[in-house]
Structure formats: C-alpha cells, structure tokens
Image (cartoon, rainbow, N blue to C red):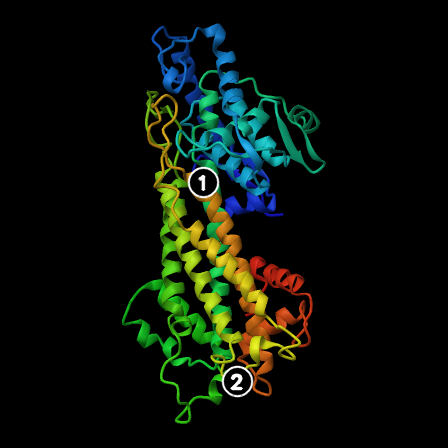
Amino acid sequence: MQERVLLDGGPLSRDQVVAVARHGAGVGVTADALAAVAATRAHVERLADATTPTYGVSTGFGALAVRHIPADRRTALQRSLIRSHAAGAGPRVETEVVRALMLLRLRTLATARTGVRASTVEAMAAMLDAGITPVVPEYGSLGCSGDLAPLSAAALALMGEGEVETKGGVVPAAQALREAGIEPVVLAEKEGLALINGTDGMLGMLALALHDLNILLDTADLTAAMSVEALLGTDRVFAPELHALRPHPGQAVSAARILEYLRDSPIVASHRGPDCTRVQDAYSLRCTPQVHGAARDTVTHAEMVADRELAAAIDNPVVLPDGRVESNGNFHGAPVAYVLDFLAIPVADVASMAERRTDRMLDVARSHGLPPFLAHDPGVDSGHMIAQYTQAGIVSELKRLAVPASVDSIPSSAMQEDHVSMGWSAARKLRKAVDGLATVLAVELLTAARALDLRAPLTPAPATAAAVAALRGRVPGPGPDRHLAPEIAAAEDLVRSGALLRRN
C-alpha cells in the first residue's frame, strides 16, 4: 500500500490518483483545507436564509431551477436529487475507477469552492480511507453537468443508501458505514449538486489510462526491438542523427530506446556488412520510432490536459473567494473527452504495427529463415498461428474503439443540457483499448522471444536477452504445441505490471 494522500485544496498528481484508486492508499484532508471549507460554507448558509433565490442553494435544478424551494423542504430536495440521479444501469464499474471518481470529487470539495460543510468532506474522506467503494453502474453519464449518475451512486452511499463493496463483499451502504463508524450524511443546501457536478469519473479513468500507457509504450519499444532482431533487421535506422532531422520529442525517445535495446547484439552483427542484400526493412520495423513516438507525444498532450484538470475546481454553481455564488459551464467534459478519444487512435495504431511485426515472424516467406509459424514440426504443429489471429481480432476491435465518442451529443433535461460531451463513454472505450494493446504486445513478446530462441546459436542483445529470460521464468521455450492461452496470459501479466521493463 502507498503512503496516505492528504488533500490540502491544491492539485493532485496523477501518481496520487493511481495510488488511491489502484493501490488502496489512504486519504485525509488537512486542517487548513477543512477550515477553508467551513468559511465558504458560511457564505452559503447566509444565502440559504435570504429571501432572494440562489440557484443550487434554494432552487430546483436544471430545467426545474425556476422553482424557489422553502427552507423546510431543502433536505428533501437534496435527498431527492441524489436518489433520482442515481439512475445508472449495466454492470458494476471497476473498483479503481470508483475510488478515483470519489477521490477527485473529494479534491474539488476540499478546494472550498463548492460550499459544502466540512463534516461532509470528512465523511467522504473516511469512506475512501476505510476502503468502502460504492457500487456504480456503467451507464448513465453523458459527460455534461458532470458524471451525474455515477457520482450520484457514490453520493447515495454517503447518505447510507444503496450498496457498497468492502473487503467482505457487496453489502448495504448503511451497514458498511455503521461498521466503519461513519455517520451517514444528511445533505444540506447546495451539497447534492456539489457531490455530483464534476467530470471526476472520466478524469479518473484518464489518469489511470495515462499511467498504463506509459508502461505499455515503453514495453512496445522493447518488443519492437526484439522483433527487429528476430527478423534480422538493421539497427542503423534508429541512429540519433536521423531522428534529429524530424525533431519530434517522442520519436527521439523511442529511437534511442530501441537502439539501446539492440546494443551489442550478435544477431544484428551477424548480418551487418557487404553480404547483406536487403536495402530496407519493412515499415513495421523501420518506422517504429515514428509511430511509437507520435503515440508518446499524444500521451504528453493528454498529460498536460489531465494535470490542468487535476488542479481544477469543477462545480455549478461555484462559490468564489469573495462569497459570490455563480453559475458556470466548467462541468462540461469536452477538454477531457477530446484527449480520451485522441489517445484511442495511437493505441490502435501501435497495436496494429505490433501485429504486423508478429505476422512477419510467422510467415516463412518474410521471416528470413525461421520455420513456418515458428512451429516445432510444421504441419503437425501450428506454432503461433492462432495467437496472431487473436492479435488481429483485437486490433480490429481497437480500430472500432478509435471512433470518437466526443463528436456525439444527445440533448437532455428538456433541452437545458442541449450539448453534452460523452466523455464518460470515451473513457470507457479507452480502458478497453488499453487492455487490448496489452494483449497484443504480450503476443508479440511471446512470438519474438520464440523467434530469438530459434536463431540459436546466434544470441540476442543483453537487453532483449533479459526480456526473453523474464518470459522464460513463466513460459517454456520452443517445443511442440502447448495450450497457448495460459502463456498469453502470463506474458500479459509481465507486460501490464511493468515487470518486463524492470529487467532492462
């Protein structure tokens, strides 16, 4: 478990989001942040007592904002808001996504720009700290006015209603709160909106995807180097002076990494010189830094957007430092939705290139001396033939997932919310795409390692040999056909966890 994350009203880092969401790090709120929250709450309470209506404090919501709600009905208003908006459907969202969503909503509450009570902030922090995760259905967010249905499911649990996941399984929220010594929150004016009016679900999924993609793109450089070596490709195309001619930062990084992985390779040295008759390698080998590098630069852009969002205070209305309560449109998910969609494109393309390299190693006409499909006894054995089919099926799916969600909009709330971002949908499909890329790279790893073994007595470079050794700790070397699915799963675990990279 990671160290406890303390919210002070300032920005969070992506690493902190991953620590809480994925690794169960504890959460707390500083005394200074709670004091600031309490000071802002005093402004809201003055407005609540005023005869002039204030949106979100003493009115209905959305298309129903024209109604002034009397003081004795406002608790019911907040409760009704959460119950009615917790209208999601479909399978449960992953625990790490819900924890990220809760953390990011809590961070905004701790900025003192939402007008909630300090006790509400403390209760949400206590839920996270106790490992109580609301059950959140997958469908219900349009990515505008926040991730309303998912956040409402979390807020419902804070009220002691609905279901939550704990170490003991799925239980009623009231039971989990009671066992953890947390008093269910009875929402006061403004608090219902403050708990649900943010882009926290899609932002949480973006932060998690960026963490995973940094590992996967580093892994893609390694598996590409293994394939280049296995296919008797040249390392000259990765020379820094060539990439300086096209000064994209990501391209230079990928080229340098691949060149380093191929350093001191006896296989590469074996076909260097005047006896080599090939003029150029295929694009899937030669252009790897250009594709991987463009993917890296896309990730860098998405990280910039994510970091800005992790410093944002998103709510509607917001309470400004001078006490004014103002409506705004900061809850619109477009900035996050665009980069979620953008990332799905290079994910598909990096996977597509990896599949092409794999296919070359299996084709006797293009593999430069390797046996058909890397089979032990071709004809009797099929080798990695169908592993490539699996790659191809996933790559085809990744192309479909690269179609943007953020260009769609379905009006809602009686045309009050007449343009929505679909950012939650963009995030959901990106998670699936990232999973697909991991599997595709796992198959390339399996195939390239087998091909390198079959190049014996020639040996690979020290770095690629270390990758083969890491795999061989879980998967045997070449031989007659075996059940491949468990081997793909073992390779995938090496890829996803980053363990493969730690050997280099």
Q: Is residue 13 visible?
A: no
- Judge left or right: residue 326 versus residue 176: left
Q: Which residue is mark 2?
A: 369
In percent of width and height, residue 12 lies at 46, 42
- Judge left or right: residue 305 versus residue 128: left
In percent of width and height, residue 436 lies at 52, 55
Label 1 crowding class (10 Å Cα cut-off): few <14, some 14-19, many 20+? many
Callout 2, which amino acid?
A: Gly
Q: Which residue is mark 1?
A: 425
In percent of width and height, residue 106 lies at 50, 32
In the rendered image, the vertical position of residue 3 relative to residue 492, given as above or below: above
Q: Residue at x 43, y 14 (%)?
A: 45
**Mark 2 or mark 1, earlier in chain:** 2
- Judge left or right: residue 331 versus residue 119: left
Residue 167, located in which quarter of the rendered image? top right
In percent of width and height, residue 295 lies at 39, 59
- Judge by depth and name the residue closer to the eye, 260 or 109: 260
Q: Residue at x 43, y 38 (%)?
A: 10
Q: Residue furthest front?
A: 379
Label 2 crowding class (10 Å Cα cut-off): few <14, some 14-19, many 20+? some
In the rendered image, the vertical position of residue 96 relative to residue 357, given as above or below: above
- Judge by depth and name the residue closer to the eye, 359 or 291: 359
Residue 451, located in which quarter of the rendered image? bottom right
Callout 1, which amino acid?
A: Ser
Q: Residue at x 34, y 25 (%)?
A: 320
Q: Residue furthest left?
A: 245
- Judge left or right: residue 273 versus residue 364: left
Q: CA distance from mark 2 to mark 1?
A: 46 Å
